[in-house]
Image: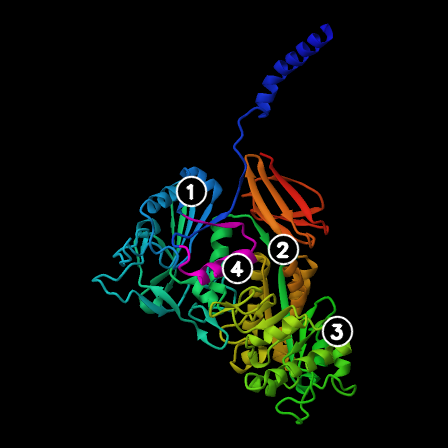
Amino acid sequence: MVKIKLRRYFLSLTAFLLLPIAASTGWLQPKAAPHQVRAGLLITTPGTDQGTLAAYAAVLKEEGFPWVEIGPGDLNLTPGELVARYPAMILPEGLNQVLPSPLPRVLTDYVLSGGKVLLVYDPGIRGAGGERLPEPVLAGLAGVNYGPAPGGDQETYDDGYWQFPTPRLAVSWGITPGKLDRDNAVSSYGYGRLRYRHNRARLLDARLIAYDSRAGLNPVITEKSYPSGGVVIFVNIPLGFYKQMSDDLPLRSVLRTFLIKYTHLPRLVNTPQGKGGLVVNFHLDSNAHIGPLRAMIQRGVFRPDLQYSIHITAGPDTYRPGDGYGFDAASPLKGRPWVELMQKYGAIGSHGGWIHNYFAANLEKLPRQEVWRYLALNCDTLSRITGRPVLEYSAPSGNHPPFVNEWLQQHGVLAYYSPGDTGSSPTQSIFHGRQVSGNLWSFPITPYQEYAALEELMTAGVPLAEVKGWFDDLLDFIEEEHVIRLVYTHANKKEYALEALAHLANRAARDQEEERLLVWPMSRFAAFLNRYEQTEATFNQEPAGWVIKLRNKAGLADLTVAVYTGGDPYRVIGHHLTWRQEGEWLYITTTAGIVDNDIYLRRLK
């Protein structure tokens, strides 16, 4: 009994003596509860536009942002609690036209407490009865009136352009180099300057970022900042609509810019090791493309350390059956030696169905079984030569109706080049509101204004120095934004093409050697993306830092998270990790194929 009492006394005394130490070190300080950090996708009118909601959800998932759909009932918190739980709120178009009466005040208090809000196109434009308001209820908060024109003009929107004051500002908003025309308007391959739907808006006290000059500097993107650190971004384009119409870049660039550069939201980076990725896609349509290959190898365009996507139309004909102008991949005297040689420079993919021009011109006229036969001939011929399955596809002349994807998926293809969604990241494409890629990854062409292949740039008279500058700007963008982009052209032995491609190859090889870039075939990136999509990632913020939990039954190797540190030093705690600091962002990569990983970040000051 005495021993027990003495022991209790000793423990009590020890605790008393340690109390000041514990207090001074923070052991006994009250701790704020850790909370999961996510962007809130605010929907006040659920069920009104499922296509738009699906478009936003698809891009947020592909970009690895933590997010959750929320409604007015989820906002019954103090402004400070809302900011901590949802550092960003996104109001998509079409789903928030009528805002419940308390909500504008809630959003205002949220911004005044440091919250960030993205308003897209039309939130709060209608009253409770559905009537169009002369001034949207969030106009003052946004600093821009996107309501009807003065005098009650009911023609409140127009199709116009999307322009930036400078290319540099456009790039800072995620617009891929080459996507602007000479007047800094967003353009596309084969079309030139693109038209977008805008409300007729008028600046109040926001900063103008992008505009439509055709309508007298009609605001397209605005920013209003608050002393609290809060900010409201207004985007005068129905972004989800254009995503559904095979124009992915507007929605993706705005979400990335808002969530990364304004909100500093952590994310799972959708590139291997968090590095930039480049796909160089060569199309070999006919025997006219055999001769240039030797010159391209001699100039260092093809080199083993750069792995390209090399797509071949394998048949003996090009324009019509029996013409003899094809690549003829099966012939040991024509195409076969080149297929065997080109394997060491990347992945051999299928370019259409056996007869390049004939297949492209008649694809939608031929019976489906005939289409399947041509596709199988092309893939099987190349596979027999290489001894490997064909995992990549590109459409001849860009003719790629959605039904082709049915066959590609059934035969193990992972990825295809696409003339839609130009200038954007690999995506699972949506067209007319319908998902058309299935589980295939679409790799959009990156154009230079309305051109893409080098022969088009040559014909248009674009100076060689300008093309080299574009390649440099594009690689800078890919590496700084940590994104994947595809450029494509055909085999060509003209000096213009050789010099341009050698410049690209030399720069890409240097950057890959310096571990800033990966030059891979699209199928290798697609295999990574298929595994990436299976990852569950949660980001919990604590007073001392972050707790990040990753789960993936297919393995976590080369998966990377990005966390904003703001220049503060952090200690990284965990297993099988490498990390690097880039500016104010910390990139942490799991190095082993484990299925679970917990990462702890502890602030050092």
In space, the residues marked 1 and 4 are separated at their CA atoms by: 27 Å
- Residue 557 position, x and y percent, is 70, 53
Query: Can you tell which of label 1 and label 2 is closer to the viewer?
Result: 2
Give amino acid for label 4. Answer: Ala
As measured in the structure, the alpha-carbon distance from the residue carrying label 4 to the one carrying label 3 is: 34 Å
Where disc 1 sits, the SS reads: loop
In whole angstroms, how far apart are the C-alphas of marks 1 and 3?
54 Å
- At label 2, which amino acid type do we have? Gln
* Comes first in the chain, label 4 or label 2: 4
Whole-angstrom CA distance, mark 4 to mark 2, is 14 Å
Q: Residue at x 45, y 42 (%)?
A: 83
Task: Using the rendered image of the protein, determine whether residue 104 is visible from the camera's viewpoint.
Answer: yes
**Which label is found at residue 343?**
3
Q: Disc 1 versus disc 2: distance between alpha carbons? A: 33 Å
401 left or right, relative to 522: left
Residue type at the position of mark 1: Gly
- Mark 3 is on which residue type? Gln
The residue that disc 2 covers is 534
> In this orientation, does residue 493 appear?
no
Checking the image for residue 114, the label placed there is 1
Q: Which residues are magenta?
A: 46-71
- Mark 4 = which residue? 58
